[in-house]
Image: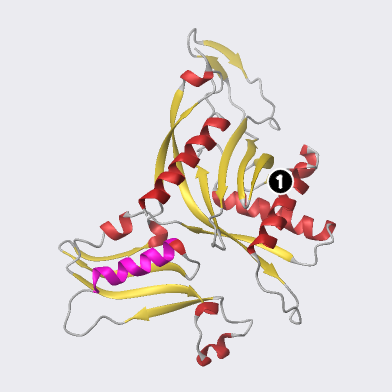
Amino acid sequence: MNSQEQKKNVPIYFYYLAISKQKDSNDSSVYDIQQIVAAFSALLSYITQKSLNDRKKDITSSEKVVWLDSFEDLKNGNYNVIFKSAKYNHVRNEIDTETMTELGTRKRQKDGDEEKTHLCVRLTKGQHRFLAVHESNHYGISINCIIDYLNTQFENYNEDSDDKYHYELSYEIMPGDDFIASLKDAKTTSALKLTVSKDVIKDDFMQFANRDEIDDEVEIWIKRPKGVKKFPDNLIKAYYDDLQSNNRIKKISVKGTKTSGQFEVDTDLMKMKHYLSVCSEIVTNEVNSVDFFVKAQEFIEEMRNKK
């Protein structure tokens, strides 16, 4: 048997990645996604040119070392990225489970098992944020850990390069269609809240929000029409479609009642999850990287064709 004949089901989650650009108040340049893509490509190259010891980050709270192992730049904002991690301070007595022969403690406290975590990053033409497919690996690293690692590296990149801008990565959950499905059996919907960037609200009143102590996101509460028990389904669906395709709406929350009582749902709690059947390595049973990225791309294309 070779590695191509061994399969495993891998859970994947979907996120939106955005890269903000910090600039001086007298800088009139506009946000250019191509310039952002160039900066992100430069960052990945910058990291992988370092030695492993210099590119690692020690996450002491979880006793884990994290580093960017490799990446493939597919151009135009598309990347296949592999991270690795190793958990230390995890030493146990080992035993041969076939013969039940005790093997003792063969690892040192500073030794850890390498784990791969795959991230498929794609940019659709006309968009200003990336789609990221994250391999959910219990022994690997979370999307939050990945963003934290890359932002630390962005800080180092900003110090070492002649790029006059500073960059910061953030992520948002891509909700699954369970959000819409969960509203179908609602008896009433009494509150609808949209969380949006304050920049998208073109109103004189928003001049008061252009202050450092005001958050960059604004909550908009929408009143239910008089004489009805629910918000129109097509209204919520329109907001949901906008969240999926644009940068304007960040989160949708709905309150109401069902036969079982009161309920509240929001898009952050219902992130999109899927399983890929991927080839695995025969000895380690790790995901085969080439096959993962092929299967992830196929599923992305399948999603796009449905729209």
Q: Is residue 156 left or right of 209 when viewed as pictured?
A: right
Q: Is residue 53 left or right of 120 when viewed as pictured?
A: right
Which quadrant holds the C terminus? bottom left
* 250 shown above or below 114: below
Q: Position of residue 3 (x, y in %)?
A: 53, 19
Q: Position of residue 130 (x, y in %)?
A: 56, 56
* 53 shown above or below 270: above
Residue 236 included in the magenta stretch of the image = yes
- The amino acid sitting under disc 1 is Lys
Please identify the dominant SS of the magenta region.
helix
Q: Residues within 10 Å of mark 1 (few under 14, many from 20)?
A: some
* 30 shown above or below 290: below
Image quadrant of residue 216?
Answer: bottom right
SS at badge 1: strand
Image quadrant of residue 237?
Answer: bottom left
Name the residue that disc number 1 marks: 57
Q: Is residue 190 left or right of 172 when viewed as pictured?
A: left
Whether residue 141 is visible here, answered yes or no, is no
Q: Position of residue 280 (x, y in %)?
A: 51, 25
Image point (39%, 61%), residue name: 267
Q: Which residues are magenta?
A: 231-244
Image point (84%, 56%), residue name: 160
Q: Position of residue 57 (x, y in %)?
A: 71, 46
Image quadrant of residue 255?
Answer: bottom left
Q: Is residue 64 left or right of 142 when viewed as pictured?
A: right
